[in-house]
Amino acid sequence: MKEVWVRLEHWDQGMVTTALESGADAVVAPQGLADRIRALGRIAVVSEDGDRVPGRDVHFVDVRSPEEEQQAARLLEQGAVVAVRHADWEIIPMENLVARAGRLLVTVETESRLETALGILERGVFGVMVSAPDPATLRRWVLKVRGAMPKETLVEAEIVAVRPVGLGDRVCVDTCLLMEAGQGALVGNSAGFLFLVQAETRPNPYVAPRPFRINAGAVHAYVKVPDGRTRYLCELRAGDRLLVVDPTGTAVEAVVGRCKIERRPLLLVEAVSGERSGSLLVQNAETICLTAADGSGLSVTQLEPGRRILAAIAPEGRHFGMPVSETITER
């Protein structure tokens, strides 16, 4: 997820409060304001007397010439956090820096520049320093950054087998988000073939909807999280982040509130898409739904060979949750 730092030129309680309430990651402030900011809530302060000290934890640079661009590039190559205060906003220098894949933040003072920063080379910068004119604008810009998650590419896959396999430990992920119909998590036995498992948003004669919950699958399964990573379901804890996706591929971030691991009867679901195949172990219960090709929920108790569902397929294997280009076979 992209970072949002809020830049203050002077003390402004309304701006600090808005930064806290909208979920900003840090406040960049003049020296002497750190204690006043911390008194309003817990947030990182970037200043000489703050949590992140300029010149030590973050390097502020200008990029208005090729020489300054090279200085910023060298810092990024060294692994430093680089915050660009002033730039001529020619796209090419920003693209050159973003292409180095470092921790680059840029100052934005207009909404159009915010959108440009988020879209450079399609992946955007690591973060932005927002210099907004008022609290309402600040809130809108921070929320825009928070919603700037890359879309997931979903394809149709065909169910080829469904069978009970006995008891196993499965994970219910209870999030801090009231999900809408169709939203869910990408889960699978292979990180390269993830099924869209929907949240429990549908009315059911046996249990009330729980739109914050995804009955995701067995403890060993991979689940997609932000920043292109996967984790094992059994690793998730309160406060972790989960990627929530809808049938169009639109993704948002959700905070995990808790995970419930319980022993339940499991179904093995197998599917193919082109030359790729994948599988998923889920609880054998009517409330668990995969996603049909038309985006509707399809209960796992109604699955049968030939039904078409949505999945996310990636060419890479995974090592510690990160995509790697090497030969990895998962069966």
Image (spheres, grey):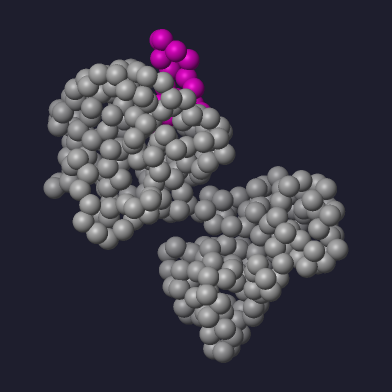
Residue 64, given in percent of the width and then of the height, sits at 61, 85
Displayed quadrant of residue 187: top left
| Image position of 17 (left or right of 25) | right
Residue 225, given in percent of the width and then of the height, sits at 44, 45
Q: Is the magenta stretch mostly helix, strand or loop?
A: loop
Residue 223, given in percent of the width and then of the height, sits at 38, 40
Which residue is found at the position 49% from the left and 22% from the top? 210
Q: Is residue 290 visible?
A: yes
The C terminus: image quadrant: top left
| Image position of 146 (left or right of 201) | right
User: Which of 186/141 is in front?
Assistant: 186
In the image, which residues are magenta?
198-215
Which residue is found at the position 48% from the left and 71% from the top? 98
Was residue 207 drawn as part of the magenta stretch in this picture?
yes
Q: Is residue 136 visible?
A: no
Query: For the image shown, how many numbered marks are present on the structure?
Result: 0
Residue 315, given in percent of the width and then of the height, sits at 25, 54
User: Which of 112/74 is in front?
Assistant: 74
